[in-house]
């Protein structure tokens, strides 16, 4: 079983080789190191999946990192059905995106660096999902974040990219702070960080409370909410969603891998992993469901009017992540993971497809300046269509099965669930609408760009299109493992597979209701596509008119509810000015610079004064030594 | 005393020391006939490896015990420290080769003196008798005085050596006075016998014995640079050739810690309450002065000198704890400190080139742009010295703090953690200079395969021990088992 | 018994110490007391023979004096060590013999070193 430790280690080795030898020796052959490594991980992940499918749960403690009295920190891996699904998702999509990057990043001056960081990311992500304890989870959690900032700011010469990296870092600080506190609280409560121990003892903590500033707070609820803080940051949920659209400044393969398929789903994975804790707290579950439901419609509504191709998909990601949290919140953990799994394929495909478009148009990202690309880029077009149909929830495709299950579980999840179902259904309409708005504006109609661009239009090289085709297969077929029992007896194989870890879904309802929910979701999906068809292919003046008529709404959506501006005014600016005045003024200028430049200040001056004791005179030194002994003797005599 | 009863066979237990001293003597003679200093260095390394191998063999055969009429102990505790000394010799020689040529002080005696100093340290680590301890200490000290002043054409080196010598003589006087008071009251210089005499003769409350103990502590405090006996350290560290600064910040310090641990645990064990009450304030002011004054330094060697003072303050916590766990965590600390500190000094040495000292903090500005690899390694060492996981420095601090807490010294640990946080300030300043400033002058690195190897090994060990601390922790625990 | 130990055996040492001090001081004191005190310039010059002194009395000595002095001390100590060793030779036997050989051998190496480094030559 130890060979499975190679799953994260192979990409780590690739990272080390690339970072050490990349600059001078490997250069533009970096993919020969990273791609085999990640494919190797994929093969091992498949083997692990087979093992798990045959009923094994692999829980190995490799070694104990720190052992000291009661405090001991093991380093170990847990491969159960949940991890196995995540491993397949992460390694398969990484493999495809690595291959795609060979074409996309070709000729970039940071080619080796790109593959090095990407490999490091895959290592971190795999550590995160394979960990068997909270500390390693936390390590992976921070490490994927770090790689994400590196990669968002990959083109650090570009100011907007560097700023986006910074923004992601800072916004995630808020969430990770809570997450860190959550992990500490887990240790204080359970005396261990190992999943098995924590989850098996979870029951014994029910009803215990912690006093915070005089308020009695339920321990489990507090732990769950703190952990969920981390998830809100990492998975870009309200109100910490602002970093994700900006993160699109990074190279497109990064957007596909990190900001769509894997890293942003870490929050979903973590909540699912901690389901024994979350299930014990009604408050926490409701919070998760409401945050998810509201985020799904909120982000989808913004997506309706955006013009940047990658940002539309980014808002779509935020919205789909909202669906997943909605599922988790109503107790349908396996539905959430199922959607995570299908979403990874069609969303990665959307990003890579958009990357292919951007590549062809020489970094043009505004869909208003595209159009008619269908005939130039057939492979990109058809794979894009597959992904969009999937996300719109057209029956038979992957997105249909997973989204339908979430909607049904939400509907069946009581009164609150009913309301959230309504939100999610409206969001589903929006999803279908903006996805096809994107397609019609990009691939249909006439080309609206410059002649120069039109002249160079071309399909991407096969090293880029072949991953698209593979992902398209995933976008179509990956949902077939989760056909609802309503349509096919024992069709929900993924749900059954995950049941030992995540438990059977809750909620009840009649067959009639289930048919109704399904029918409605298909209807809104089709309606969304049809509306987009009318507005962007038939009556192209319509969007403009609507925009004029509902100017307030349009502006609100176009400016993303002014959330960025709100944060800027209420948080960023005050903090900046305070930190500039206090932190920068005091620490940077006065202490760091001041000590060097001789500007007096508190510690610096103290330090300067203390160093004067060091006169350089031998006799002073000798006197100091003798005085030292005398003082000790005196102290001993007088203090006795 | 019947000298003939000396078990000649038990002499084998000092075989490593005999080998080392013989090699040192051979190096002196070789220096007369061989002009290539690299050859002498090579023989020195070879001899050290032989001594280490013999030492390992003796351990592997499971021989422990004492020799030289019970004055010299061959046990796990001593062997652990000897391991540090062997590593210290080899790495010091590696970083010296090219550097001493640059300093125009490439003498054969240099390598011989390193071996002499180290054999003195080995006697200190093994000494279970105050006389042997003293002789070992003097052998180490005299050799180090010369090494500090070996760049004899540099005034600051001469000054450093002279100061170190005079103050060292002063501290030797303390030690001898302490030893003679102890001897006068207990009638023995053997550590175990002192301990039993303390009980049997009812000396635990004797003020004169207490005075003797204070003087012994002061003398060792001088060697490990505890405030206020630290005054020599910054001057000597700055003035000495950098390779010797690195050597001195590890070898003599570890040897003095070894001897202090053994004397306080073995001889004055019953007086733990008394000596810990002396050491606690010493460690607090040591951490305070070391960390705070380091902030004001602009010369990196001086900064590392204060950092070394501060680290002595942390390591002292292991002895203060007064438990076997504390002692083993102190041993851990010394071993890890050896690696990360030699690594840091090796980078400092690389910056030295013909006509360029490379010792000012400002010389590190923008180093990451021109020399990314060296900067990345320096970053590892600085993180480790600060104690940031997953580097070994974190492990060292973690275990020593944990043991101190277990022994009931939580307030002291809180103080240590606060000063440790302050220390981030000047260590990370180096990192900030390297990564966030624009390079001012062009810095060329004086690399050589030996120095490359040193840095690679120390960086690798710093990371590996950070990830797999049990390798070292278990070794330290095992070493102390029979203590 | 340690702790209450009175060093009676060392009484002769103390007596010798006192006697030696007296032997050194008494003639000087007697001279001061007994000699006639008549000072004049010629009598106060360093050399009454009439040689005028040349240069300052606190001039630097050549570093070679120190080297020679140090070497003298080293080999003097060797000789001092040989003395008790010879006295106790019949009791320490072969072991003592080997011990002394090693000691002399180490000094011999030092001697060769000093010789080769030309520290024994005056110019």
Image (cartoon, helix red, strand yellow):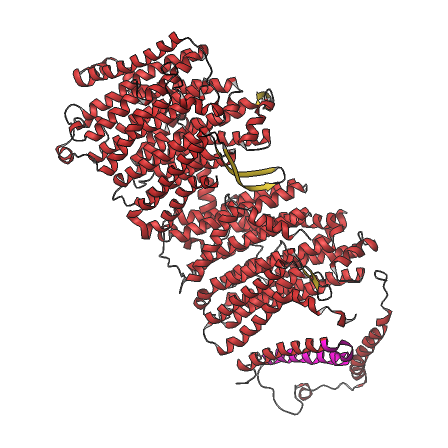
Can residue A210 be seen here? The reply is no
Comparing A529 with A465, the one in front is A465
**Residue lying furthest bottom:** C49
Q: Magenta region: which residues?
A: C67-94
The quadrant where residue C111 appears? bottom right
Comparing A115 with B189, the one in front is A115
The image shows residue C51, relative to residue A65, as above or below, that is below
Q: Position of residue A236 (x, y in %)?
A: 39, 27
Q: Position of residue A600 (x, y in %)?
A: 49, 46
Q: Position of residue A443 (x, y in %)?
A: 19, 26
The image shows residue A230, relative to residue B135, as above or below, that is above
Comparing A615 with B468, the one in front is B468
Q: Residue at x 38, y 45 (%)?
A: A14
> Would you say residue B121 sits in the magenta stretch?
no
The quadrant where residue C55 appears? bottom right
> Would you say residue C85 sits in the magenta stretch?
yes
Q: Residue at x 48, y 29 (%)?
A: A55
Can residue A65 be seen here? The reply is yes
In the image: residue A383, left or right of residue B46: left
Q: Residue at x 31, y 30 (%)?
A: A348
The image shows residue B68, relative to residue A159, as above or below, that is below
């Amino acid at each position: 079983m130890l060979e499975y430790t190679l799953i994260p280690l192979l990409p780590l080795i690739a990272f080390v080789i690339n970072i050490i030898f990349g600059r001078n020796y490997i250069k533009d052959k970096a993919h020969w190191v990273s791609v085999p490594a990640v494919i190797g991980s994929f093969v091992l992940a498949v083997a692990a999946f087979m093992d798990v499918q045959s009923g094994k749960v692999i829980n190995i403690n490799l070694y104990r990192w720190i052992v000291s009295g009661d405090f001991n920190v093991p380093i170990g891996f847990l491969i159960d059905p949940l991890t196995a699904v995540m491993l397949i998702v992460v390694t398969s999509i990484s493999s495809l995106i690595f291959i795609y990057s060979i074409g996309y990043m070709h000729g970039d001056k940071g080619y080796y660096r790109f593959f090095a960081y990407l490999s490091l990311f895959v290592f971190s992500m795999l550590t995160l999902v394979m960990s068997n304890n909270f500390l390693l989870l936390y390590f992976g959690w921070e490490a994927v974040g770090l790689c994400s900032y590196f990669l968002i700011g990959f083109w650090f010469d570009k100011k907007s990219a560097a700023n986006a990296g910074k923004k992601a870092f800072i916004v995630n600080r808020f969430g990770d702070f809570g997450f860190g506190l959550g992990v500490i609280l887990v240790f204080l409560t359970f005396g261990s960080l190992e999943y098995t121990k924590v989850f098996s003892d979870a029951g014994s903590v029910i009803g215990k409370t912690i006093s915070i500033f005089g308020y009695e707070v339920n321990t489990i609820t507090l732990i769950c909410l703190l952990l969920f803080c981390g998830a809100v940051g990492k998975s870009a949920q309200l109100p910490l969603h602002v970093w994700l659209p900006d993160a699109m400044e990074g190279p497109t393969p990064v957007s596909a891998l990190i900001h769509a398929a894997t890293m942003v789903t870490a929050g979903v994975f973590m909540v699912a992993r901690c389901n024994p804790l979350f299930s014990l707290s009604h408050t926490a579950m409701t919070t998760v469901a409401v945050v998810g439901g509201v985020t799904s419609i909120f982000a989808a509504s913004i997506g309706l009017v955006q013009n940047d191709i990658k940002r539309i998909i980014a808002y779509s990601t935020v919205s789909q992540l909202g669906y997943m949290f909605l599922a988790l919140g109503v107790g349908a953990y396996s539905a959430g993971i199922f959607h995570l799994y299908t979403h990874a394929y069609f969303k990665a495909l959307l990003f890579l497809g958009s990357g292919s478009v951007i590549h062809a148009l020489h970094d043009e990202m505004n869909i208003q300046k595209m159009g008619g690309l269908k005939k130039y880029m057939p492979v990109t077009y058809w794979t894009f269509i597959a992904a969009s149909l999937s996300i719109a929830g057209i029956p038979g495709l992957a997105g249909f099965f997973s989204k339908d299950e979430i909607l049904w579980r939400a509907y069946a999840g009581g009164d609150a669930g009913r309301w959230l179902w309504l939100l999610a259904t409206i969001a589903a309409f929006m999803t279908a609408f903006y996805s096809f708005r994107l397609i019609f504006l990009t691939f249909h109609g006439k080309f609206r760009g410059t002649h120069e661009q039109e002249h160079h239009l071309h399909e991407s090289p096969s090293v880029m299109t072949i991953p698209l085709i593979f992902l398209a297969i995933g976008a179509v077929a990956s949902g077939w493992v989760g056909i609802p029992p309503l349509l096919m007896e024992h069709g929900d194989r993924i749900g059954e597979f995950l049941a030992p870890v995540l438990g059977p879904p809750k909620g009840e309802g009649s067959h009639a209701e289930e048919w109704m929910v399904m029918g409605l979701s298909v209807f809104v999906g089709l309606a969304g596509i049809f509306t987009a068809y009318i507005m962007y292919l038939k009556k192209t003046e319509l969007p403009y008119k609507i925009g004029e008529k509902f100017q307030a709404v349009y502006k609100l959506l176009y400016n993303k509810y002014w959330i960025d501006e709100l944060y800027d005014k209420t948080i960023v600016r005050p903090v900046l000015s305070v930190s500039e005045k206090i932190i920068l003024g005091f620490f940077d200028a006065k202490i760091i610079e001041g000590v060097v430049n001789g500007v007096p200040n508190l510690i610096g001056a103290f330090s300067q004064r203390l160093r004067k004791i060091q006169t350089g005179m031998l006799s002073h030194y000798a006197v100091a030594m003798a005085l030292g002994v005398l003082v000790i003797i005196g102290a001993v005599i007088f203090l006795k | 005393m019947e000298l003939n009863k000396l078990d000649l066979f038990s002499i084998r237990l000092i075989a490593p020391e005999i080998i080392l001293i013989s090699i040192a003597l051979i190096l002196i003679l070789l220096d007369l006939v061989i002009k290539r200093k690299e050859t002498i260095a090579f023989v020195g390394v070879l001899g050290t490896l032989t001594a280490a191998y013999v030492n390992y063999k003796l351990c592997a055969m499971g021989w422990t015990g004492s020799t030289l009429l019970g004055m010299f102990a061959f046990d796990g505790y001593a062997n652990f420290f000897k391991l540090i000394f062997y590593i210290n010799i080899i790495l010091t020689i590696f970083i010296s080769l090219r550097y001493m040529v640059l300093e125009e002080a490439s003498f054969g005696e240099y390598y011989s003196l390193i071996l002499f100093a180290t054999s003195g340290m080995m006697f200190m680590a093994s000494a279970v008798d105050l006389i042997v301890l003293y002789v070992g200490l003097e052998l180490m000290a005299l050799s180090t005085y010369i090494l500090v002043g070996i760049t004899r054409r540099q005034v600051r080196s001469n000054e450093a050596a002279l100061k170190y010598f005079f103050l060292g003589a002063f501290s030797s006087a303390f030690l001898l006075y302490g030893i003679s008071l102890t001897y006068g009251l207990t009638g023995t210089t053997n550590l175990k016998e002192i301990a039993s005499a303390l009980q049997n003769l009812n000396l635990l409350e004797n003020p004169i014995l207490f005075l003797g103990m204070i003087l012994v502590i002061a003398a060792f405090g001088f060697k490990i640079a505890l405030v206020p006996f630290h005054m020599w350290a910054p001057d000597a560290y700055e003035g000495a050739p950098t390779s010797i600064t690195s050597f001195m910040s590890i070898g003599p310090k570890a040897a003095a810690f070894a001897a202090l641990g053994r004397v306080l645990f073995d001889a004055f064990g019953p007086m733990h309450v008394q000596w810990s009450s002396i050491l606690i304030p010493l460690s607090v002011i040591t951490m305070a002065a070391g960390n705070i004054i380091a902030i004001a330094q602009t010369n990196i060697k001086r900064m590392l000198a204060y950092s070394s003072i501060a680290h002595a303050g942390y390591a002292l916590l292991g002895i203060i704890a007064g438990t076997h766990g504390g002692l083993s965590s102190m041993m851990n600390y010394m071993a890890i400190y050896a690696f990360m500190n030699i690594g840091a000094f090796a980078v400092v040495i690389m910056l030295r080139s013909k006509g360029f000292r490379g010792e000012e903090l400002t010389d590190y500005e923008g180093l990451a742009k021109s020399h990314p690899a060296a900067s990345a390694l320096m970053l590892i060492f600085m993180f480790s010295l600060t104690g940031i996981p997953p580097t070994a420095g974190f492990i060292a601090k973690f275990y020593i703090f944990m043991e101190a807490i277990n022994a009931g010294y939580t307030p002291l640990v809180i103080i240590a953690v606060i000063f440790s946080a302050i220390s981030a300030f000047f260590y990370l300043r180096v990192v900030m200079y390297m990564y966030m400033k624009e390079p001012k002058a062009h810095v060329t690195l004086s690399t050589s395969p030996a120095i490359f190897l040193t840095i690679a090994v120390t960086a690798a060990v710093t990371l590996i021990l950070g990830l797999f601390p049990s390798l070292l922790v278990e070794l330290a625990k095992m070493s102390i088992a029979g203590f | 018994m340690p702790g209450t130990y009175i060093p009676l055996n060392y009484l002769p040492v103390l007596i010798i110490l006192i006697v030696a001090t007296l032997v050194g001081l008494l003639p000087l004191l007697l001279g001061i007391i007994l000699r006639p005190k008549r000072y004049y310039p010629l009598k106060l010059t360093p050399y009454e023979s009439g040689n005028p002194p040349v240069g300052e009395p606190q001039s630097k000595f050549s570093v070679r004096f120190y080297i020679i002095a140090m070497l003298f001390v080293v080999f003097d100590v060797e000789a001092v060590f040989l003395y008790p060793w010879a006295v106790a030779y019949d009791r320490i036997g072969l072991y003592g013999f080997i011990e002394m050989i090693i000691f002399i051998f180490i000094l011999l190496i030092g001697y060769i070193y000093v010789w080769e480094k030309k520290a024994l030559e005056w110019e």
